[in-house]
Image (tube, rainbow, N blue to C red):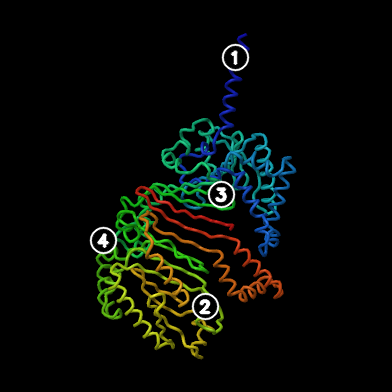
């Protein structure tokens, strides 16, 4: 009777231990000392999406698809997968679920090469994981022997944990989990976790506890980086110092340096909706409490109130961003060291000589903080001169604080610059009333001197400018200038939202396709030279690439700053 009770007790304990081990999470096996963690949370779904996308008809139409699949590395990978299917007795999709289904984690420390890393592969089937690890070891041993590298297997014991070694790889098994590292001493930190001391794991650490609620449950993969260790480096501290030796860096990138300075960690994750993907990057520092180094790119109240990115037919790239150069002028004593300040004051005084009596500081202070940039491929009708290469048109739209005064100053400066340019190349002035707006432009004269410059490169441009309300347009072509005049007039009647978005960028694949279409002959020649193809075959591949790009939608970037957090979102919309 006592024997039966003793046996029953041990069976219950064994069942509880087995159940706990089977339900273990890979983060429970990562030491709390980790400086970074990269996790594939849903390996089965991510692999399936990747497989379906790569083998979709959409991708198979790409030129070079079959050639890419015939690469030696790809063929070896396919052979390895087939070998694993045969030896383990399961198709690869089932193997992914049973061997990776619990998640895959790569963690490590910052430091000199080779910095310690730990790979945790959490499976669902312990016997199958043991069999797979032996199979992997056999394959690695054969590869090392083929390369005449040390391939003798060794065994070590670290804090009661048996660790095997092959070359520079160390590994051990813990139930259905495989743990691999490049350093033996890593297992001194892993061993207590395998013995149930999970309070010393990354999953239970305070630094992760403050970030784990941010990553959404539907994320396919995510990453976490500790930002505190890099900030102890002298070089990094010098970079973050304001005023410091790198004032120009803070003027243009101070927003990101300020967030880095005030954040303990950075986390990112990947989500999917059909064939569209979104990458989100999060930092626990927002516009509240931002330092002086961020002032040119972050408004004091956090409300940027950006206008939407400009959209025109043939658009390739469009950006709307917050950049207040006037804030630098106002706070330059805090941005610049004494020596830098003296240098800037000398430059500012001398700038009046080539800015027609206006100082640089006056121009910068007169600009608003909300601007836009556009790259597009409009229909060109200004010239009939053929060019060696067709370049896209571009435009910069500046916001003005005092629209009338600043508009007149900018127009005078641009007219003066164009007059000086006529000493180098022949241009004709073009002034026209377009939809009630005065559009000033310049056309390059069709003569031998202009044709000889870079095989007619100048005839990609007909620079122009115009003012629409408090928006000042600088364009590289009259065609794009006319389109934007209409677009800016429409915006004058639309209310603006006071939101926390600090920049929005859009890349149009269809616009890139238009640009390639304009330069198709150059693309054909490139295919002929790189792949030794006939002109007909190269032209067919060029057409296929252009058609493929037209099936894509766009790539969008958006940076948002809330009071206590900041987020960058990258949306990849792949299909129309």
| Label 4 – label 2 distance at C-alpha | 47 Å
* Picture quadrant of residue 341: bottom left
Which numbered disc covers residue 334?
4
Mark before the other along the chain sequence, 4 or 2? 4
> What residue is drawn where x is 49% and y is 68%?
312
Q: Which image quadrant: the C terminus? A: bottom right
> What residue is drawn where x is 63% and y is 12%?
4
| Label 1 – label 4 distance at C-alpha | 76 Å
| Label 3 – label 4 distance at C-alpha | 46 Å
> What residue is drawn where x is 61% and y is 45%?
45
Mark before the other along the chain sequence, 2 or 1? 1
| Label 2 – label 3 distance at C-alpha | 38 Å
| Label 3 – label 1 distance at C-alpha | 54 Å
Q: Which residue carries the number 2 mark?
A: 380
Q: Which residue carries the number 3 mark?
A: 273
Q: Which structural element holds mark 3? A: strand
Q: Nearer the viewer, mark 3 or mark 4?
A: 3
Labels 4 and 2 touching (C-beta < 8 A)? no
282 left or right, relative to 181: left
From the viewer's side, name the closer residue of 276 and 564: 276
């Amino acid at each position: 009777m006592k024997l039966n009770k003793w046996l029953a007790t041990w069976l219950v304990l064994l069942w509880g231990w087995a159940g706990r081990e089977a339900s273990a999470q890979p983060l429970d096996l990562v030491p709390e000392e980790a400086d970074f963690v990269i996790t594939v949370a849903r390996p089965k779904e991510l692999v399936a999406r990747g497989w379906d996308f790569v083998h979709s008809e959409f991708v198979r139409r790409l030129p070079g698809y079959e050639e890419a699949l015939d690469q030696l590395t790809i063929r070896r990978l396919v052979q390895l997968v087939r070998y694993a299917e045969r030896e383990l007795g399961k198709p690869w999709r089932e193997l992914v679920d049973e061997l990776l289904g619990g998640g895959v984690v790569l963690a490590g420390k910052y430091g000199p090469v080779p910095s310690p890393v730990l790979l945790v592969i959490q499976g669902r089937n312990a016997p199958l994981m043991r069999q797979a690890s032996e199979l992997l070891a056999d394959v690695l041993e054969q590869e090392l022997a083929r390369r005449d590298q040390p391939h003798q297997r060794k065994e070590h014991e670290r804090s009661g944990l048996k660790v095997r070694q092959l070359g520079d790889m160390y590994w051990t098994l813990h139930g259905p989990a495989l743990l691999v590292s490049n350093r033996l001493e890593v297992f001194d930190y892993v061993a207590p976790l395998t013995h149930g001391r999970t309070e010393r794991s990354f999953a239970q650490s305070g630094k992760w506890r403050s970030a784990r609620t941010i990553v959404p449950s539907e994320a396919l993969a995510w990453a976490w980086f500790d930002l505190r260790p890099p900030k102890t480096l002298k070089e990094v501290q010098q970079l973050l110092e304001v005023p410091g030796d790198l004032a120009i860096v803070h003027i243009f990138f101070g927003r990101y340096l300020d967030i880095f300075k005030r954040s303990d960690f950075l986390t990112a994750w990947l989500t999917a909706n059909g064939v569209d993907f979104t990458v989100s990057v999060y930092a626990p520092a927002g516009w509240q409490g931002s330092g002086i180094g961020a002032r040119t790119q972050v408004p004091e109240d956090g409300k940027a109130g950006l206008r939407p990115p400009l959209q025109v037919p043939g658009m390739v790239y469009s950006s709307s961003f917050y950049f207040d150069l006037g804030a630098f002028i106002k706070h330059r004593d805090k941005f610049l060291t004494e020596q830098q300040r003296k240098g800037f004051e000398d430059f500012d005084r001398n700038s009046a000589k080539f800015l027609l009596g206006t100082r640089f500081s006056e121009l910068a202070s007169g600009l608003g903080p909300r601007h836009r940039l556009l790259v597009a491929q409009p229909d060109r009708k200004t010239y009939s001169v053929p060019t060696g290469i067709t370049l896209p048109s571009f435009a910069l739209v500046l916001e003005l604080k005092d629209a009338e005064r600043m508009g007149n100053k900018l127009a005078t400066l641009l007219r003066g610059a164009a007059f000086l340019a006529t000493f180098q190349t022949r241009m004709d002035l073009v002034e026209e009333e377009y939809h009630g707006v005065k559009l000033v432009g310049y056309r390059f004269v069709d003569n031998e001197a202009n044709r000889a410059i870079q095989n007619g490169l100048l005839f990609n441009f007909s620079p122009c400018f115009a003012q629409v309300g408090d928006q000042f347009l600088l364009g590289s072509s009259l065609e794009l200038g006319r389109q934007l005049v209409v677009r800016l007039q429409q915006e004058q009647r639309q209310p603006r939202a006071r939101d926390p978005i600090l920049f929005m960028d859009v890349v149009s694949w269809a616009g890139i396709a238009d640009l390639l279409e304009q330069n198709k002959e150059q693309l054909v020649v490139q295919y002929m030279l790189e792949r030794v193809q006939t002109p007909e075959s190269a032209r067919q591949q060029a057409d296929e690439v252009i058609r493929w790009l037209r099936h894509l939608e766009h790539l969008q970037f958006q940076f948002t700053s809330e009071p206590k957090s900041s987020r960058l979102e990258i949306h990849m919309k792949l299909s129309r």
